[in-house]
Image: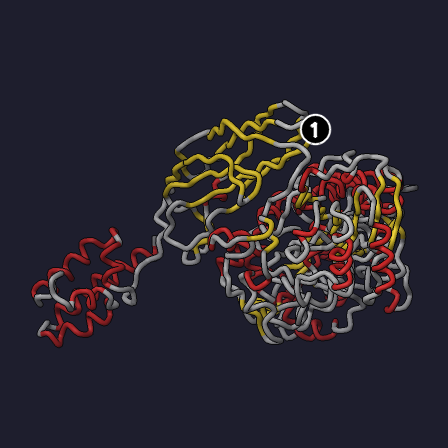
Amino acid sequence: MNIEELIGKMTVEEKISLLAGASPWRTQAIERLNIPSIKLTDGPHGVRLTTASEPGEMLSKTQPATAFPIEAAMAATWNEPLIHELGVVIAEECQYYDVGIILGPGMNGKRSPLGGRNFEYFSEDPFLTGKIGASFVKGVQEGGVGTSIKHFAANEQETNRMVVSSEVDERTLRELYMLPFEMVINEAKPWTIMCSYNKVNGIHMANNDKYLNGLLKQEWGFEGLVMSDWGAAVDKVASVQYGLDLEMPGPGHRNAEVVEAYRNKQITAEQLDDHVRRILKVIHLVLAHKREVQSIDVDHHHAIARRVAEEAIVLLKNEDFILPLVKKAKIAVLGKFAEAPRFQGGGSSHMNPALLDIPLQEISKFAHTVYGAGYDETDNDELLKKACELAAGQDAVIIFVGTTEKIESEGYDREDLNIPRNHTRLIDAVSKVNPNVIIVVNSGSAIDIGTYESQVKAIVQAWLPGQAGGSAIANVLFGEVNPSGKLTETFPLALEHNPSYLSFPGNIKQVKYAEGIFVGYRYYDTKKLDVKYAFGYGLSYTEFEYSNLRLSSNSLKDGDVLKVTVDVKNVGECTGKEVVQVYVRDVKSSVLKADKELKGFAKVELIPGETKSVQIEVNERAFSHYIEHLGKFAVESGEFQILVGASSRDIRLFGTTTFTSSGDLREPLTLQHSLQEWLKDGRYADKVQFVMSQMSQMKINEDNPLYPIVLGMPIRIILSSLQSYGYSQEVVDQIHGMFSEASAAQEIV
């Protein structure tokens, strides 16, 4: 496809027709020029390709495909190569169904555990989100299928998501909510990006010139196309002016508006051609990578889904080492989810699984089981009584509980962190007749475990584990697989402890990200607030010992990469995998920072007694923060601690390095700053000394009670009062000029 030649042959009307879809799931074709339509479909946990002809059947009638674990579970594996392999499988199934672009992965953050779509996002930590997201995108696109990373940006809630304005300061946006997108663009080069419904600081993302044109396309150099979320292009003309390339869904009903705006010179030929060029480039990529896939290896893909589910499972509690369970034991399996598994989230990612493992059936392969539903949609006393009868006298009891689709789904946010009352009633009742209770939790994000944690021996966080979740859970419970998942979001002691508690979800007009950069463990760890389960936490059937931390350098400068090496030994009795986590702490900063931030990780497998050296590279960006007055990330000279551990609260080793930056990154002082601020800043010693001498002449020295008051005054107030004390206008102008020049010079630097 000769893109420039095609652009030259197209009429204005044809170009504009390309800027909207032809139908809900296809781009516009131009038959005259042999430009075909390409197919898009929902993800991100697999291929959700609708077969429905009626809107009401869009989510229920879909082609069978491998339903992988939700993104929250994918991230809990902390296994980049495994997620890459998952992406390759998704691409294979896309090729089979002639899908050119899959809509995913979701890259948004988790500022509140109540976010209804949290299950569809990776982590509360932007670095982890970026790394896992990049692995996903690389896998899919290496398979010849494009991805659409979404939802750009600041789309962390379902309440009013189509109209609300996310009010976020620039540093928070860059460091938390845009960083994952930036990482994926740099590391994986996604073919498309989907903008979100919401406004950011008052401007809809579909026509946000600052972030679509300015940040994405110019600053980050994104070369793909930007599409709207379905129905997010509120102002068609503004969206064409300010960076949106493709409006979805189709058909386009507002093309005439764009034609008129073009004729009125509101839209330029250059703008139009840039949009068309980006769309044609993606169509060309889809066509160039199209492969004929005659059939899907359903069993092989199911096996990969199982591996992801197994590595995603997080063992939260294992009192008296009740797990792994003894095979052939007598086990009561309770809870409706054991027979009708809760394996996926609700909404646009809802899939038709090619296969589906039933947990009860898979557990029964290892043990002598009896089953009771235990609960239904209501408080059913008969089911509860029957469950207790079944549990009494058994070697152990496995209870399946968790959130329902009515609690956790796209479209609305959660009301609290609770699981249904009939689930907790079952736990409470059964734990009174059998002391060996193990609960398996199916949820897409953090829940309140505190109410029943003390009543049970073990807690297995299985997430919404996809179609192979049943066998994955059984394999972990009976020791066929050693659990190695780690939490990618904090489980707080109480919802009220969450930093967004008072501002989430705002009102229909706006939601203020009042907590700034202090989201998740960044808040809890800085606040030194107890949590139920920390970020990065997860137990194993074995134990790991950390030792011999080595840093490649104790002195860094711009462009340097620090190599962090640590020895990890399996000191237990079975093979297992450990996630080594590297955090960075800025010892002293001129701006407020979190206590520590994740900047590297690696997953390593060890047999009993084995030691491996794990090396993790930490680049310059890991030490930086976004500096608003400079409009960039940079490192402030100083000392940094390198913390290595098994979670954000389980730091095993630490070292120290010093970073020397080439530039002075401090914010320039102005006439609004106090004399004390100028006095503390070594850049202006000569200027401040002159003012201090003038104060001495006024007999305002350290012994004078007026001295601290004057120190707290802005320079402009001091200047305005000098004439009152007999100073000439010439001296006042001299001092004013000195300080104005100093602040202006610093701004230029």
Percent of width and height locating residue 520: 56, 54
How dense is the environment of label 1, judged by Cα within 10 Å: few (below 14), some, or many (20 and up)? Answer: some
Tell me the residue at 70%/28% (across/down). Answer: 574
514, 237: nearer the viewer? 514
Q: Can residue 64 be seen in the rendering of this structure?
A: yes
Pick the front one: 159 or 362 = 362
Looking at the picture, how far across and down is residue 573, in whole percent? 68, 27
Rendered view: 121 above or below 240:
above
In terms of image quadrants, where is residue 510? bottom right
Residue ID at (82%, 59%): 26
Residue type, mark 1 in image: Thr
Res 606 quadrant in image: top right
Residue carrying label 1: 575
Colouring of the image: secondary structure
* Residue 513 in picture, x, y percent from top left: 54, 65
Please name the residue shown 69% across and 75% down the image. Answer: 260
Viewer-proximal residue, 234 or 500? 500
Q: Nearer the viewer, residue 40 or 71?
A: 71
